Amino acid sequence: MFTTIGRMAAISVAALCLTATAHAHATFDIAEATQDSSFKGVVKIGHGCEGSPTHTVIISVPEGVIGVKPMPKSGWKLKTTTGAYARTYDYFGRPMSEGVKEIVWSDGQLKDSEYDEFVFSSRISGAVPTGPLHFPVTQLCEKGEHRWSEVAAPGVDPHSLKSPAPAVRIKAKQVAQAGGHGSHGTQTQAQHQHHAAPTASGLILHLPWTRATPPGAKVAGGFMTIENKTGTADRLIGGSFEVANVFEVHEMAMEGGVMKMRALPKGLEVPAGGKAELKPGGYHVMFIDLKRQLKEGEKLKGELVFEKAGKIPVEYIVRPIGSTSGGHAH
Ligand SMILES: [Cu+2]
């Protein structure tokens, strides 16, 4: 009897060791991120330094990762080092040339037998090349340290490295462009993360807005960026607006040499892991047969209907007559 229990204990210890080895490195909780998109970095620390508890975790921010904000941790001191970027990036329409380069959580206590996560929010700029992007991590322990900083040379399996830097694979962004109508070259449309309304569906509606109307006007357009966080494409197929009798999904297209808007009978695709941009001169939702004038500063409600996600409530901010972008909502 005693022997049997002893053997079982031995087996479960062996199993634990295997698990510990599999999660030994400092890694991100997700494997992929997208160019020109927000990125929540969650670095997982699974053990100390040869049994010694961890008191400091330092994350180096690679070039092209901008607008970094670390998450404070209770029981840990938080410090950041800022510096100049190698170039100027566009951050929601504003130039950004410096920011957080290093995050330090210190004076903490993470036992070798425990696990914890170190989190920051950021934006992967469109200038970051596709492929692996490395965030070197230093882990300081009461005795010893780990430097998770190795980067696999081309052709080398990263799994063969002893201390690989945590990495995410950067993917290209897929954007649904306005039909017959390229980008105007400038990205002035404001998209503020903190105005985004996340939904259970995995679709995020960034800063929905519309324009004030002159007296007697019967139509208005609605604009926003729809972000699809899911792995499946969805489709905006309809909706409603509280002060219009008719709601349609529209595109701008050339017809006999004239730019005209027309309804999209099959709706508008929101690619998997990508975005659909609704903006003046491109895709938009159309509020037809307005029941009254839209006044600047109002907030007006509606619904969007998606093929897969179903109905999602939306609130539009009414911008001044003639606005070409959603601007700042505050
Ligand atoms: Cu229209």
Image: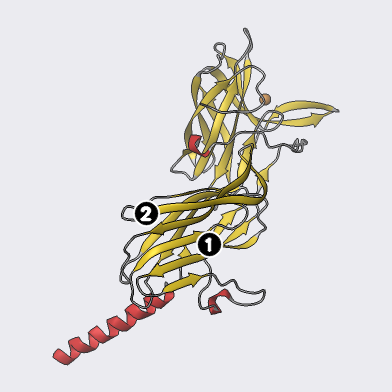
The local secondary structure at tag 2 comes to strand
Is residue 177 depicted above or below 10 in this figure? above
Q: Earlier in the sequence, mark 2 or mark 1?
A: 1
Which residue in the structure is indicated by mark 1? 31
Quadrant where the N terminus sits is: bottom left
Instruction: Name the secondary structure under disc 1.
Output: loop
Residue 96 seen in the figure:
yes
Q: For the view shown, which residue lies furthest in the bottom direction?
A: 3
Sort mark 1 into few (<14), some (14-19) or many (20+) by Cα contacts within 10 Å. Answer: few
User: Looking at the picture, which amino acid does disc 1 mark?
Assistant: Ala
Q: Which disc, if any, is residue 77?
A: 2
Between 230 and 168, which is closer to the camera in this rendering? Answer: 168
Q: Which amino acid type is marked by label 2?
A: Lys
* Residue 285 image point, x, y percent: 61, 28
User: Mark 2 or mark 1, which is nearer to you?
Assistant: 2
Q: Which residue is nearer to you in this view: 121 or 20? A: 121
Instruction: Measuring from the top left, give residue 244's x and y in whole percent.
Output: 55, 18
Q: Nearer the viewer, residue 269 or 102?
A: 102
Q: Kindly identify the residue that appears in the image at 54 percent across and 77 percent down.
A: 161
| Mark 1 Cβ inside 8 Å of ligand 1 | no
Q: Which mark is residue 269?
A: none
